[in-house]
Image (cartoon, rainbow, N blue to C red):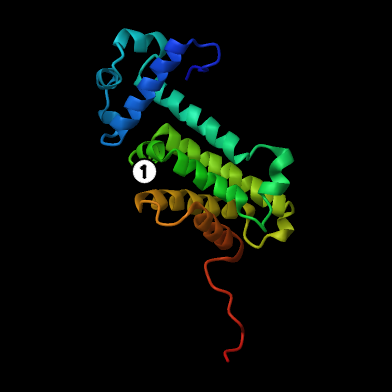
Amino acid sequence: MRCFSLEGKDRRIRRTYKFLQRALIELLQKNEISEISIKMLCERAQVTRQTFYAHFENLQDFIEYVSKFMLDDFRSEVHIFEPKLQHKFMDLKTHESIVRIFQHVLENKVFYEAFLVNNPNSPFALGLKEEIKHFVLSGVDFVAPDDAQLFPVREVIIEYVTAGYFESIIWWIKQKYPYTIERMAEMLLYISTRGPYQLMSKEKK
């Protein structure tokens, strides 16, 4: 995929990209990626095919561009690659880092519904899972840098928690956001650190 950037682009090109992205999201809400053609996209965006091909090689090229744009935004909002913020956002005593994940979903819910829920094999969906995996990996490495501090194998923990976060996001969207972002973050943090069960006293009164 070619490297795209809006830096240095004039207002007209930015507007064209915006129209194309909006049209793609609208089409993906009712269609699989494989069902969409450049003709459909350009007609909905009211952009000529000549203009489209002046910037992108094909539809997959554009889909990857849009996916990368949103994944970059996700990364910057969640701060998973900011070492100076790791202590604040990876602390097990707070769920602020997880709140940011669900906040990003809610702020871009139309995009997530189209690219993640309706098209789970899209470049964005696959990329998001990798971003969440990196997020989980950063958290586990911060809390328990030594393997001796962990009971299960580190790799198993990473895969298990990543799948839990990823599928929980999809479930939350499909269920029309039944819980607040704070509540979702709180529950996932609890499950990640204590397991799914309530702490019970050893002796029943």
The residue lying at 74 percent from left, 39 percent from top is 84
Q: For residue 125, which quarter of the picture?
A: top left
Q: For residue 39, which quarter of the picture?
A: top left
Q: Position of residue 5 (x, y in %)?
A: 52, 17
Q: Dot 1 corresponds to which residue? A: 117
Give the residue furthest to the bottom. 205
Q: Is residue 60 visible?
A: no
Between 3 and 7, the residue placed more toward the observer is 7
The residue lying at 43 percent from left, 12 percent from top is 13
Q: Residues within 10 Å of mark 1 (few under 14, many from 20)?
A: some
| Quadrant of the drawing holding the C terminus | bottom right
The answer to whether residue 62 is above or below residue 13 is below
Q: Position of residue 137 (x, y in %)?
A: 62, 46
The residue lying at 57 percent from left, 89 percent from top is 204
Between 138 and 17, the residue placed more toward the observer is 17
Q: Is residue 135 visible?
A: yes
Question: What's the residue type where badge 1 is placed?
Answer: Val
The residue lying at 38 percent from left, 38 percent from top is 110
Q: Position of residue 194 (x, y in %)?
A: 60, 65
Give the residue furthest to the front. 11
Left or right position of 28 against 184: left
The answer to whether residue 19 is above or below residue 48 is below
Left or right position of 1 against 43: right
The answer to whether residue 16 is above or below residue 102 is above
The answer to whether residue 185 is above or below residue 128 is below
Between 59 and 146, the residue placed more toward the observer is 59
Q: Position of residue 6 (x, y in %)?
A: 51, 17
